[in-house]
């Protein structure tokens, strides 16, 4: 059977940290640290993740944070932070070519071709949803750096927290799933993005919140404006 559509749309978000390694006769060796998950929106050609996944990189020196990278099946490309919406826990990343310019045209089209689309309505309570990502960071990585797929159900159709709209999901969750797209099972329709547990980002448990597709739509439009 083919992979679920959500499975192929996700990317690992991490950093490469240079370290001195005289044992391998190298001045530096790259150590990958996976921090969370991101995903492509196909039509908008935008790469989305959670703000809290990359927040520690904002304004910090490269020597301490490492180089921001986005990867699939073990292949990683450099990225930069383009837009951040702390209030709605969203961020847009842009892939960078070797010459330092943003990935564009056919290269960008190829990257986004496996992406997802935004829904136009909230799913009903008890509707099945799916998500895929990189829980527990490096701990569960295999040689192909495959994402982990999981399913849950809509617990509360919409929660309003200030100006932030959330969807409550019942399903297995752990740190590293942050930034994973939540889709209607069997479709490529994004209804939200995995953001946080009941008390804090990345908590392990069985109930978590997804930031609404409406906010994802807004930051994608901003990125393309």
Image (cartoon, helix red, strand yellow):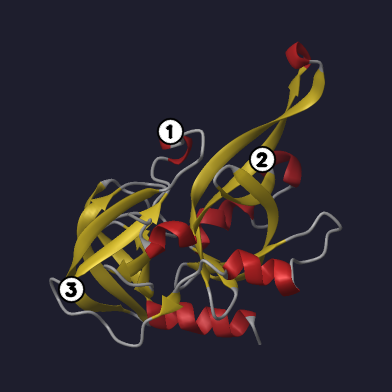
SS for dot 3: strand
Image quadrant in which the C terminus is located: bottom right
Judging by the rendered image, the residue that carries numbered circle 1 is 139
Q: Position of residue 78 (x, y in %)?
A: 71, 53
Q: Earlier in the sequence, mark 3 or mark 2?
A: 2
| Along the viewing direction, whichever of 156 and 150 lies nearer the viewer | 150
Badge 3: few (under 14), some or many (20 or more) residues near its Cα, within 10 Å? some
Q: Position of residue 173 (x, y in %)?
A: 28, 50
SS for dot 1: helix
SS for dot 2: strand
Residue at the spot 39% in from the left edge and 52% down from the top edge: 177
Residues at circles 3 and 1 in contact by the CB criterion of under 8 Å: no
Confirm whether residue 141 shows in the render.
Answer: yes
Residue 27, by quadrant, is: top right
Badge 1: few (under 14), some or many (20 or more) residues near its Cα, within 10 Å? few
Judging by the rendered image, the residue that carries numbered circle 3 is 156
Judging by the rendered image, the residue that carries numbered circle 2 is 16
Residue at the spot 31% in from the left edge and 48% down from the top edge: 203
Residue 218 against residue 112 in the figure, above or below: below
């Amino acid at each position: 059977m083919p992979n679920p559509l959500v499975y192929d749309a996700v990317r690992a978000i991490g950093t490469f940290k240079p370290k001195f390694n005289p044992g391998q006769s190298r001045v530096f060796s790259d150590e990958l640290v996976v921090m969370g998950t991101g995903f492509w929106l196909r039509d908008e050609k935008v790469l989305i993740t959670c703000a809290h996944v990359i927040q520690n990189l904002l304004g910090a020196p490269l020597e301490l944070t490492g180089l921001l990278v986005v990867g699939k099946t073990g292949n990683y490309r450099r990225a930069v932070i383009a837009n951040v919406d702390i209030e709605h826990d969203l961020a847009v990343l842009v892939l960078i070519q070797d010459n330092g310019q943003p990935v564009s045209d056919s290269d960008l089209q190829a990257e986004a071709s496996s992406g997802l689309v935004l829904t136009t309505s909230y799913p009903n309570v008890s509707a099945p949803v799916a998500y895929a990502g990189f829980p527990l960071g490096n701990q569960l990585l295999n040689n192909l750096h495959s994402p982990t797929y999981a399913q849950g159900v809509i617990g509360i159709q919409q929660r309003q927290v200030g100006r932030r709209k959330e969807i409550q999901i019942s399903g297995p969750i752990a740190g590293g799933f942050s930034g994973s797209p939540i889709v209607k099972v069997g479709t490529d329709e994004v209804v939200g993005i995995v953001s946080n547990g009941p008390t804090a980002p990345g908590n392990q448990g069985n109930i978590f919140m997804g930031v609404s597709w409406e906010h994802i739509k807004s930051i994608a439009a901003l990125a393309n404006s």
